[in-house]
Amino acid sequence: LKVTSLLTRLRQDPEQAATSLLELIADLQELDIIEELRFPMTDDSLDTMHQVFDVCAKGIERTCQDLEPWSLDTENLEGIRVRVGEGQFFMLRKSLHDPIISLQLEALDRDQAQTLIVDPLMALLESDEPIKSSLDLNILRNF
């Protein structure tokens, strides 16, 4: 949607009128790691999922203020999305119908995913006892 909007604005500029969608995305780097990890609640409760997500989101927002290169994407409406440089990001969101929090991550390679996303996120989640006891983090531990 953002690319389409950008393309529309560029076409209104006479100097940019020849810009095509393919030209806009030509320099985008493809990411080798595109994963979705799903964390079930240990008590299978939707209420717990909502509470745990809110605590996670607040912790991630605080971490973005202190941890380079984490940068909060404020234009995201699906959950909480953090950019970690070079087109890499992760997004944490809650399921609409199941007691599951999902983590989507996209990174250049597995090492970058581990270093920039998984390790700091794991440290954050394990530092909070209510999160640690309510969220099954095994899938993240085994990434």
Image (cartoon, helix red, strand yellow):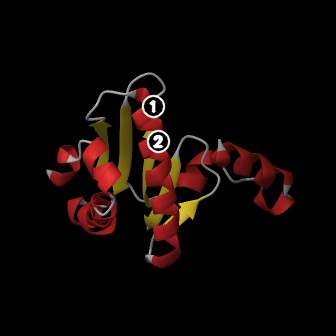
Which sits in the foreground, 88 or 43?
43
**Which numbered tag is attached to residue 47?**
1
- Mark 1 and mark 2: Cα distance apart in space: 6 Å
Q: Quadrant of residue 4?
A: top right
Whether residue 108 sits left or right of residue 84 in the image: it is: left
Q: Quadrant of residue 123?
A: bottom left
**Which numbered tag is attached to residue 51?**
2
Give the amino acid at mark 2: Gln
Which sits in the foreground, 127 or 107?
127
Which sits in the foreground, 123 or 28?
123
Whether residue 139 sits left or right of residue 134 in the image: it is: left
Would you place residue 15 above or below residue 81 in this image? below
Badges 1 and 2: C-beta atoms under 8 Å apart? yes
Which sits in the foreground, 114 or 96?
96
Whether residue 134 sits left or right of residue 23 in the image: it is: left
Instruction: Tell me the residue at 46%/61% (across/down).
Output: 60
Instruction: Tell me the residue at 31%/27% (across/down).
Output: 44
Whether residue 50 sits left or right of residue 76 in the image: it is: left
10 Å crowding of disc 2: few (<14), some (14-19), many (20+): few
Q: Secondary structure under badge 1? A: helix
Instruction: Tell me the residue at 24%/42% (across/down).
Output: 136
**Residue ranking furthest to the left:** 142
